[in-house]
Image: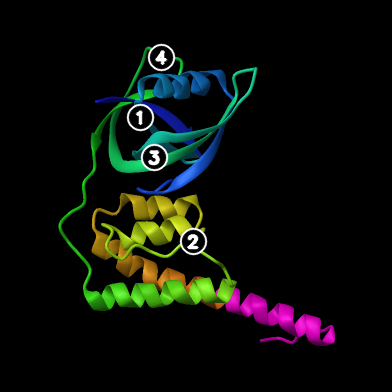
């Protein structure tokens, strides 16, 4: 199946929503066609290392602004993952033949999920953040967490490419604990500095 691509320094995991500012003419054309036909497009990470081979099929769920010069502010939602088979030609925007990238049937144990959830709660509490509750009945706890915690594009891409929910959950738990440790240390330093004007080595 051929899909129009929107390469960005951005990774969206299935179920994640994000705002996009669309200003380049070729991508205004791509998003305009998607709006007219109700079709999807693909977001794929592109950085100094090049364009990756795994991305997510996305749809426009809301148009926030349409400017006279054709620029758009939209909200998109990531759907299923895809594997890039090969780039195609003929359009102003990049296109490729893609195929769905389903998960293997390897699910995490209750203990592995609980460990991941405890680590996630540590991060949220340490950051004193107010985040939407996780849907524990959803297909992927890992993707929900990855959409709420900013690990950066490289880490999210790694999670996106994993073919097993169990592996994602097991991979996330230590990363979340490390993030919680970092946030707690930063908060302690701020509190000490505010208390006596000095920062004592930890």
Residue 154 pos. (x, y %): 46, 52
Residue visible at 38% across and 36% down in the picture: 58
Residue 108 pos. (x, y %): 23, 68
Residue 40: which disc? 1
Callouts 2 and 4 close, C-beta under 8 Å: no
Classify mark 1: helix, strand or loop: loop
Q: Quadrant of residue 141?
A: bottom left
* Quarter in which the C terminus is drawn: bottom right
Range covered by the magenta-colored residues: 182-202
Residue 31 pos. (x, y %): 46, 24
* Quarter in which the N terminus is drawn: top left
Classify mark 2: helix, strand or loop: loop
Q: Is residue 61 above or below residue 38?
A: below
Q: Residues within 10 Å of mark 2 (few under 14, many from 20)?
A: some
Using the numbered discs, state the Cα–Cα distance from disc 1 to disc 3 in whole angstroms: 19 Å
Asked whether 126 or 162 is in front, the reply is 126
Callouts 1 and 2 close, C-beta under 8 Å: no
Using the numbered discs, state the Cα–Cα distance from disc 4 to disc 3 in whole angstroms: 20 Å
Q: Is residue 65 above or below residue 36?
A: below
**Is tag 3's residue or tag 2's residue first in the polypeptide sequence?**
3
Using the numbered discs, state the Cα–Cα distance from disc 1 to disc 2 in whole angstroms: 26 Å
* Residue 189 shown in magenta: yes
Discs 2/4, front? 2
Classify mark 3: helix, strand or loop: loop
Classify mark 4: helix, strand or loop: loop
Residue on which the image places disc 3: 52
Residue visible at 47% across and 59% down in the picture: 148
Residue on which the image places disc 4: 91
């Amino acid at each position: 199946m051929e899909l129009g691509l929107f390469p960005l320094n951005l990774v969206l995991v299935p179920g994640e929503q994000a705002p996009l500012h669309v200003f380049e003419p070729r991508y205004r054309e791509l998003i305009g066609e998607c709006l007219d036909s109700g079709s999807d497009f693909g977001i794929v990470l592109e950085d100094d290392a090049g364009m990756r081979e795994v991305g997510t099929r996305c749809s426009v769920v809301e148009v926030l602004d349409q400017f006279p010069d054709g620029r758009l502010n939209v909200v998109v939602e990531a759907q299923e993952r895809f594997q890039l088979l090969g780039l195609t030609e003929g359009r102003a925007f990049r296109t490729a033949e893609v195929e769905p990238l389903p998960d293997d049937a390897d699910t995490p144990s209750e203990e592995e999920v609980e460990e991941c959830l405890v680590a996630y709660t540590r991060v949220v509490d340490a950051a004193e953040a107010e985040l939407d509750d996780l849907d524990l009945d959803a297909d992927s706890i890992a993707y929900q967490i990855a959409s709420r915690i900013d690990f950066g594009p490289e880490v999210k891409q790694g999670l996106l490419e994993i073919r097993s929910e169990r592996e994602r959950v097991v991979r996330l738990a230590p990363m979340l604990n490390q993030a919680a440790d970092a946030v707690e240390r930063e908060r302690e330093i701020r509190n000490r500095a505010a208390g006596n004007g000095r920062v004592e080595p930890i």
